[in-house]
Amino acid sequence: MAELNDSLNVLKEQVIACRKCARLVKYREEVARVKRRAFREWEYWGKAVPGFGDPQAQLFILGLAPAAHGGNRTGRVFTGDRSGDFLYAALHKAGFTNQATSLHRDDGLRLKNAYIAAAVRCAPPTNKPEPSEILNCRPYLEKELEVLRPRVVLALGKIAWDAYLEILKQEGKIVSRAKFVFAHGAEERPVSGGPLLVGVYHPSQQNTQTGKVTAAMYAKVLKRITRLLDEKRSN
C-alpha cells in the first residue's frame, strides 16, 4: 500500500510540474489570471491536474480533460463544474464515493475502489485537445494503469475510449482500435485477462442538459460494474 502511494505521489508531482504543451500551458495560465467573474475571489490552480482516488482502486475512470473553470480552478479532476456535479452524484449513488459533491480539494471527498484521471491533464481551449497533446500526456496514464492494475476501465466519452485503446495498440496488445466501437454501455475486453473496457457518454452539460445522457443511464452502467467487481472478488 505504501509503495502504491509513493508511486502515485511521485507521478502526481510530475504531472503538476508538466509544461510539455505550450498551447495548453498558455491557455491554462491565461484562464487562471483572467478568471471567470463568478470565481474572481478564487486563486486558480492553473497547472496540470493529476489523477485522484483510491490507490487500490479496481475501477479506473478516464475522462477527457480538466474544465477551464473546473479542474483548472480547483486543482482536482471533475471538481467545481457541472460535469463533476453529475459524475460524483452518480458515483456516490453507486457506492464509489463518500459524498455526492466535489467542490474543492479540501472538501473531504474520498473515492472508494475508484480512481479518476483524464486523457489530457491541462484544460484545452474549447475542450478540444490536439492529438499531440494527448500523446504528450500518455505516459502519465500508462504509469497510472501500470501502478493500479484496475479490473475495469470506464471511459467517459470516445476520446477517453480511444486514448486507452491507443495505449494497448502502442504496447502491441491489439492491432487496431477499429474493432472496438464506442457506445454508451459498450463493454469490451481488448486483451484476454486484462481490464474490461466500458464506455459511457461524457457527463458534459451538452449531454446532460439535452438528455443524451441521464442519471438513470449512468446508474445502470455503474450497477453493472459494481456487480462485475463483486463477482470477481467472490471468485
Image (cartoon, rainbow, N blue to C red):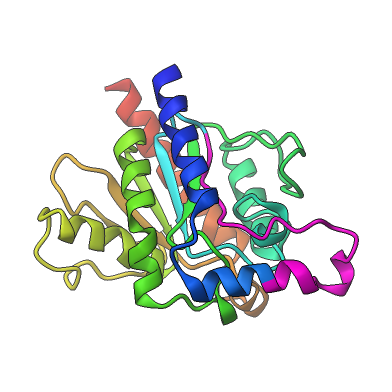
Work out whether 186 lies above or below 173.
below
Single out the residue that lies furthest toward the top.
Answer: 2
- In this orientation, does residue 1 appear? no
Counting from the top left corner in percent of width and height, residue 168 is at 20, 55
Expressed as whole percent of the image width and height from the top left, the position of residue 183 reads 36, 69
Q: Is residue 219 left or right of residue 81?
A: left
Residue 46 on the magenta segment = yes
**Residue 179 location, x and y as percent?**
16, 70
Residue 99 visible in this rendered orientation of the protein: yes
Q: Quadrant of the C terminus?
A: top left
Q: Position of residue 145 (x, y in %)?
A: 33, 43
What is the magenta range?
Answer: 30-53
Left/right of residue 33 with respect to residue 168 in the rendered view:
right
- Residue depicted at x 41% and y 26%: 4
Q: Residue at x 35, y 38 (%)?
A: 228
Residue at position x 59%, y 45% in the image: 91
| Residue 165 highlighted magenta (yes or no) | no
- Tell which of 7 and 197 is nearer to you: 7
User: Which residue is located at x 58 percent, y 58 percent?
Assistant: 216
